[in-house]
Amino acid sequence: MSVLVVIPARYASTRFPGKPLAMLGGQSIIGWVWNAASHVACVDRVVVATDDERIYTHVNQLAGKEAAMMTSPDHNSGTDRCGEVQKRLADKGELYDIVINLQGDEPFVQASQIKSLVDSIESGKADIATLRTPIGSSEELFSPNNVKVVCDNFGKALYFSRQPIPYCRGIEPEKWIDKTAYYKHVGVYAFRSAVLADLCCLQHSVLEESERLEQLRWLAAGYCIAVCDTEHANIGIDTPDDLAAAERYLAEIK
């Protein structure tokens, strides 16, 4: 099956303006993500989807013409931006079976993670695939910035929440981490192409509005989300402090 990776990248981040162009280890953050995706064997094409001329120019200079695409500034999510790229390519006769949504602030994404998502879609058992990784501390568990996921016995998502799930009845909250396995959602997605086109037309749901998690819109609409395990807790960069942590991580692995 043919695979398209779309990397949504915005300049106007509230917590870190210009984040995709910030330098990490001598290379832009968006450059890191592009290189990681373009070296995955099962990936046929990588496109950075942006609404900013600076990012567009930088990526095309870095990776060649048509490595980036200017998209509408009115999109509410990276998924919508992916959908625009998919449609515009399809209108030119460039068709893909699977579309990966890889955020532009995930410089250390692993090839194995993308491969596991592709394998999950190719198996025919899910409309959408994403990742989870074990949570190892109460601090991680109770942070609303870490989205938690629970699955059924077949690895399909039941629910995503900013709250710790499941709830441990009769146990002090500080002991929950020792009583059951908790998993953090890693926000990389794979979609069947036809499914992605449909998702971009869905109305927002009550659950989504409550938690501010778009994947709850998909669950509410009845879509099946396969959740693949990964041991790599990707370092997403949302703030300048996160960038400093990524620099320290690079120093440690050299």
Image: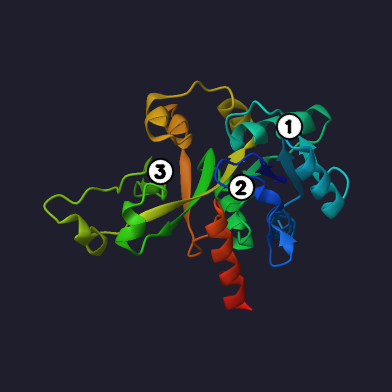
Q: Position of residue 204 (x, y in %)?
A: 47, 23
In-front residue for pair 86/75 = 75
Q: Quadrant of residue 161?
A: top left
Marks 2 and 1 sit apart, C-alpha to C-alpha, by: 15 Å
Whichever of labels 2 and 3 marks the residue nearer the N terminus, that label is 2
Give the crowd class for mark 1: few <14, some 14-19, many >=20 residues within 10 Å: many
- Residue that protrudes farthest toward the left in the picture: 170
Q: Residue at x 74, y 59 (%)?
A: 35
Q: Position of residue 6 (x, y in %)?
A: 69, 43
Q: Secondary structure at mark 2?
A: loop
In-front residue for pair 16/131 = 16
Marks 1 and 3 sit apart, C-alpha to C-alpha, by: 30 Å
Number of numbered discs present? 3
User: Foreground mark, 2 or 3?
Assistant: 2
Position of residue 201 relative to residue 210, above or below, is above
Give the crowd class for mark 2: few <14, some 14-19, many >=20 residues within 10 Å: many
Marks 2 and 3 sit apart, C-alpha to C-alpha, by: 20 Å
Q: Secondary structure at mark 3?
A: strand
Q: Position of residue 239 (x, y in %)?
A: 55, 52
Which residue in the protein does label 3 denote? 157
User: Foreground mark, 1 or 3?
Assistant: 1
Q: Secondary structure at mark 1?
A: loop
Which residue in the protein does label 2 denote? 103
